[in-house]
Image (spheres, rainbow, N blue to C red):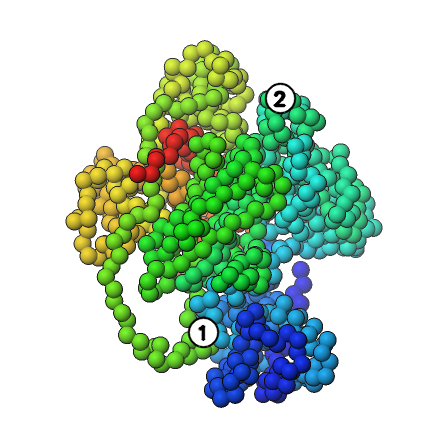
């Protein structure tokens, strides 16, 4: 890959001439009336035009070189992997913009960069802009103004910008990737997605190249969403530069559904790919498709410079009791929470439902309203995402609840509904929620709860979202008026902190199991292996779902079901059992288990995992929103507000931290019988904090794996990410001693750095992180997983959480 150097070009404009021309143009420009109401970057021009004596001056008049200075010499970021650094590319693109087309988001990035990496800047070479061509051409003025507005919507009053909810969020949102491949071929992946193009060796002639482009269009064609068909991927745009090809290419997509295992569903429905050379169609059904569970691979032989593909699940016909194609598949619904890059005293969060599992990192929002007026389109960032199973399209109720007493959701926005008909369209469905800050306290990030209820059933899905930080102070660019800097702080009485989240009550009862397995052979091991079940031929084993776990047995990697037998949870080899339904099971007494026993058993790996106490403490205190609920399940139901001193009484997070510290001290005092992390995980499972448990699981597994691997992390890095020797050395350099080498006892640090970076690419897909790490460790020359089985235990944990939630929290408590 060649690096193309581009010189940055600043812009030095005689702004006084521009403003003079603006006053003259106000009499002829048809858009001048109420200009500042929709276009804040000329607010001061319009204001000064209305009041000649107004002394308010644009910062551009006072500092004409401002844009040139802040845009120069940006620090570049280096990627330590083979992956395309999209963020870096976007930053480079942004830095090449002229000063006039730099948005306030760019300036906020600059402030962050200057704050973290202060350095001197030198002015770039400049040119003078010629504005005379606009003076007598009304149409040219109109088009230039509209183009300028579309490109930037920058705001001259940057200090006021830090308190505004909408402006400064405009950035490019279409995420696409272009990759240049040669005769050797390769794979191209759309960032943050499971959409891949595989180009085989010999696709083009030796010496020739193929540029492959991928782009996802979020709303698929509506014609494919009806009773017999439903789209389960975005509309994929594929571009090729070279049609002189010798081999076909392959499109691979992980979709949002898989056909159910029952014979009727297998016969009546199928996952198919539709293909066209035009975005609007017509589309034809492709036959060269291979489907495995929720992944489809399509062979593309009829190539063009621009092609479009969409994946759908299609039924031959609907046979009662089925009512539409959803009845034949397990359909996953993905939701994303979007908001501004920085939070403000009043801001909008957007709840978005997707008909596929591609959730982009940025989303253009076109219908934001402020003061009853429509705001221009803005680009919101992804704050959080979640995926859940929805058996059929039905009405959903969405509620957002702030976990911080300093913020609230507007009353009329606290609960909104999404109609069944909207879900059937396959298009994005959005609902807006307005947050506002209470009082005049200092801005800070906070956590809120997202709850999704299926109105016609008791199904409830919930997850927590953490907002970004407030906008940084722009003191490096604009000085605040002294009257604001010297303003005395007004202290008010502390608010009564009442948790706004009511955690469900844990119900200790027998697990509800729908699938069983009958052992086809006897398996008894001379050397017992943790987390693997032993059984006799004919035993009936309760299966906790049909998902399979890949893990090493005694010598080979096999596929396993998670099962229960004789009050014990473990893995059973798929080939050793015959799967049967609940009605076919004869004797299930030995495969029964209570929800309390399930929670206690699936948390067992945490007795042997390594953790950093300060990280666990901060993570839990930020995520748990009710100290009383946590205290009760930890056995401290007797605690009251009198047990907290003043230092722990201000915020709910501080109270939660106090409870956790209390439990840590008690466990330390009784080390032989109590283990801190194990008891904490069991407690979090009992208040249904599964998202938090998943996060702690991934963090502790990454740390423990790094410690277990030591110097062998290099072999793992080659298998997982195909790192080169130079890239591996780059991870080790920061941890080298005086002798230029990393000490063996310090080797866990580069291992941890690598695993943390690798896992970050998965986003919230913690199951995939654990499974892929298990598979990679199993394939090493001397697998640590042969002796260290806790990673396998955490795979059992994450595969049992849905079953635990369904049985232990089947009905939400009625609000008092």
Tell me where residue 378 sits by quadrant.
bottom right
Q: Position of residue 11 (x, y in %)?
A: 61, 80
The residue wearing badge 2 is: 320
Kindly tell me whether residue 568 is visible in this rendering.
yes
Residue 666 in the image: above or below residue 325: below
Front: mark 2 or 1: 2
221 and 580: which is toward the camera:
221
Please report whichever mark, 2 or 1, sits nearer to the chain's N-terminal start. Answer: 1
Q: Is mark 1 on a helix, strand or loop?
A: helix
- The quarter of the picture where the N terminus appears is bottom right
243 and 786: which is toward the camera:
243
Residue 641 in the image: above or below residue 173: above
How crowded pointer 2 is (Cα within 10 Å; few <14, some 14-19, many 20+) is rated as few
Residue located 26% across and 43% down the image:
628
Residue located 44% across and 58% down the image:
468
- The quarter of the picture where the C terminus appears is top left
782 and 337: which is toward the camera:
337
Q: Is mark 2 on a helix, strand or loop?
A: loop
Q: Judge from the rendering whether residue 353 lies leftward or rightward of residue 277; answer left or right.
A: left
Residue located 51% across and 61% down the image:
372
The residue wearing badge 1 is: 159
């Amino acid at each position: 890959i060649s690096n193309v150097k581009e010189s940055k070009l600043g812009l030095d404009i005689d702004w006084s001439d521009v403003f003079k021309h603006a006053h003259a143009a106000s009499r002829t420009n048809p858009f001048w009336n109420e200009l500042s109401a929709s276009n804040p970057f000329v607010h001061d021009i319009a204001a000064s035009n209305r009041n000649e004596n107004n002394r308010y001056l644009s910062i551009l008049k006072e500092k004409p070189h401002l844009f040139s200075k802040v845009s120069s010499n940006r620090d570049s970021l280096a990627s330590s992997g083979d992956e395309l650094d999209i963020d870096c590319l976007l930053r480079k693109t942004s830095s090449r913009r002229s000063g006039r087309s730099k948005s306030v988001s760019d300036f906020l990035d600059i402030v962050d960069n200057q704050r973290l990496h202060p350095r001197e800047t030198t002015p770039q070479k400049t040119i003078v802009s010629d504005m005379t061509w606009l003076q007598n051409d009304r149409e040219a003025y109109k088009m230039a103004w509209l183009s300028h507005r579309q490109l930037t919507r920058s705001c001259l009053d940057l200090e006021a910008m830090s308190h505004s909810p909408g402006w400064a969020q405009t950035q490019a949102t279409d995420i696409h990737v272009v990759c240049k491949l040669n005769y050797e071929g390769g794979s191209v992946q759309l960032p943050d997605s499971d959409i891949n193009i595989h180009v085989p060796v010999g696709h083009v002639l030796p010496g020739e190249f193929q540029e492959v482009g991928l782009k996802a269009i979020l709303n698929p064609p509506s014609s494919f969403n009806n009773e017999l068909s439903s789209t389960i991927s975005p509309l994929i745009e594929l571009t090729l530069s070279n049609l002189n090809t010798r081999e076909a290419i392959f499109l691979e997509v992980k979709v949002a559904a898989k056909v159910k295992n029952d014979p009727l569903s297998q016969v009546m429905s199928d996952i198919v790919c539709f293909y066209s050379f035009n975005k609007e169609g017509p589309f034809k059904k492709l036959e060269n498709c291979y489907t495995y569970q929720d992944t489809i691979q399509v062979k593309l032989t009829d190539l063009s410079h621009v092609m479009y593909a969409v994946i759908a699940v299609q039924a031959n016909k609907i046979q009662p009791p089925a009512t539409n194609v959803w009845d034949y598949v397990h359909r996953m619904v993905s939701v994303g929470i979007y908001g501004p890059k920085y939070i403000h005293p009043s801001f909008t969060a957007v709840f978005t439902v997707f008909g596929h599992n591609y959730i982009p990192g940025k989303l253009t929002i076109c219908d934001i309203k402020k003061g009853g007026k429509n705001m221009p389109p803005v680009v919101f960032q992804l704050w959080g995402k979640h995926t859940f199973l929805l058996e059929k399209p039905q009405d959903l109720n969405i509620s957002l609840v702030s976990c911080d007493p300093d913020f609230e959701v507007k009353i009329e926005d606290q609960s909104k509904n999404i109609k069944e008909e909207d879900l059937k369209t396959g298009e994005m469905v959005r609902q807006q929620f307005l947050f506002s800050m209470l009082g005049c306290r200092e801005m800070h990030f906070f956590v809120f709860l997202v709850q999704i209820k299926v109105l016609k059933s008791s199904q409830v899905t919930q997850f927590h979202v953490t907002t970004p930080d407030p906008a940084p102070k722009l003191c490096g660019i604009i000085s605040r008026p002294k009257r604001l800097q010297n303003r005395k702080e007004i202290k008010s009485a502390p608010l009564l902190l009442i948790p706004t989240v009511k955690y469900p009550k844990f119900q200790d009862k027998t697990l509800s199991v729908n699938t069983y397995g009958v052992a086809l052979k006897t398996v008894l091991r001379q050397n017992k292996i943790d987390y693997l079940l032993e059984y006799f031929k004919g035993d009936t084993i309760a299966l906790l779902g049909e998902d399979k776990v890949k893990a090493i047995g005694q010598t080979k990697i096999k596929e396993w079901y998670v099962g229960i037998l004789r009050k014990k949870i473990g893995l059973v080899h798929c080939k050793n059992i015959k799967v049967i339904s609940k009605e076919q099971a004869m004797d299930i007494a030995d495969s029964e288990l209570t929800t309390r026993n399930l929670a206690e058993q699936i948390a067992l790996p945490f007795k042997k995992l390594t953790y950093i106490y300060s990280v666990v403490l901060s993570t839990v205190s930020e995520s748990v929103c009710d100290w009383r609920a946590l205290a009760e399940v930890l056995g401290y139901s007797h605690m009251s507000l009198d047990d907290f001193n003043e230092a722990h009484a201000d915020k709910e997070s501080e109270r939660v931290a106090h409870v956790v510290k209390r439990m840590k001290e008690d466990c330390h005092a009784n080390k032989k019988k109590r283990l801190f992390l194990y008891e904490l995980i069991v407690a979090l499972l009992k208040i249904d904090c599964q998202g938090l448990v998943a996060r702690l699981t991934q963090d502790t597994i990454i740390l423990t794996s790094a410690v277990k691997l030591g110097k062998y992390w290099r072999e793992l890095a080659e298998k997982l990410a195909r790192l080169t020797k130079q890239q591996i050395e780059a991870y080790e350099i920061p941890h080298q001693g005086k002798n230029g080498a990393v000490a063996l006892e310090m080797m866990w640090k580069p291992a941890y750095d690598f695993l943390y970076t690798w896992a970050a690419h998965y986003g919230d897909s913690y199951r995939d992180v654990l499974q892929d790490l298990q598979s990679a460790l199993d394939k090493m020359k001397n697998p640590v997983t042969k002796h260290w089985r806790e990673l396998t235990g955490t795979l059992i944990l994450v595969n049992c959480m849905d079953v635990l939630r369904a049985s232990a929290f089947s009905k939400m408590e009625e609000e008092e």
